[in-house]
Amino acid sequence: MMKDPFNDLIDQLRKEHISDDVLHILHDDFLMRRKQQEFVTNIITKYPEDTLLLQETFAWAQEQHSKQQQIITIVPNTITFPYFSHPLSVALSAMSLCLPSSLVQACLLHDVIEDCACKEQQFIAKRWKRTASKIMMLSKQPWESHQDYLTRIMESPLCIKQIKALDIYHNLIRALTVDYVPYLQRLLKEVEVYYLPLFAHDKKLSLLYPQVKKLFQAVCLHCVYLSNRT
């Protein structure tokens, strides 16, 4: 029987002294089918008045991201996952914190302008005008430096910072599959300076703070391991 390459990744991360509870978070983040089922259950039980809106948003966002894949290389194998698993994970985190349905919708859509070349007019045509303004604020503009973008996000309304923080939370999870040290170093610096304090002090986000801190420490170990290997 062929060995699952994802298990090879888990085995490698164990050698880097990544804790089992962090590996469990990573494993769950890639279970696309289970996440879809969880989303359907949650919108019915937690957002009964907005079930149709969130179902429509899910289908539209999934279609926009349909050509995008995330590829993880674990020599000599590669694993391919639908990129849509990322915005879906961000939306599920928003649901777990009982954030409003408007923010769950924005989580599903937060990458469609940057990654799928969608336009603000497409949201307006769907009568998602309020959501369009959130997605525009969340999207890095072509003329912005990365630092200017970060500064703008931190000066934005709380709801925008909450969505971006959940985006970063899942970027931290996926960072354990990345072997490009400069990216990891930049991400860790951003999390330490901007996002750890936000998770620590925001009433809603603080529920995830213990997990974020564990993930931050795990990615630090992963980055050190990769730096020493080269």
Image (tube, grey):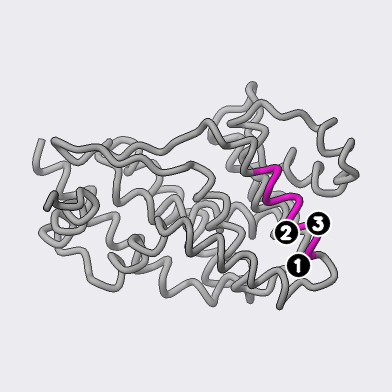
Q: Earlier in the sequence, mark 3 or mark 2?
A: 3
**First to last magenta residue range:** 51-61
Which residue type does callout 2 highlight?
Leu
Relative to 30, 44 lies left or right: right
Distance from Cα at disc 1 to Cα at disc 3: 13 Å
Q: Which mark is residue 53?
A: 3
| Residue 203 rendering spot, x and y as whole percentages | 63, 76
Q: Which residue is mark 1?
A: 100
Q: Are marks 1 and 2 in contact (CB under 8 Å)?
A: yes
Q: Secondary structure at mark 2?
A: helix
Instruction: Residue 211: name its quadrant.
Output: bottom left
**Residue drawn at 58 percent across, 37 percent down:** 65
Distance from Cα at disc 3 to Cα at disc 2: 12 Å
Which residue type does callout 1 highlight?
Pro
**Residue drawn at 76 percent across, 67 percent down:** 100
- Residue 63 vertical position relative to residue 108 in the rendered view, above or below: above
Q: In the image shown, does 166 or 158 lie closer to the viewer?
A: 166
Instruction: Residue 96: name its quadrant.
Output: bottom right
Q: Secondary structure at mark 3?
A: helix
Please give the count of numbered marks on the rendered protein.
Answer: 3
Q: Which residue is mark 2?
A: 103
Q: Which mark is residue 59?
A: none
| Residue 144 rendering spot, x and y as whole percentages | 62, 27
- Residue 182 vertical position relative to residue 162 in the rendered view, above or below: above
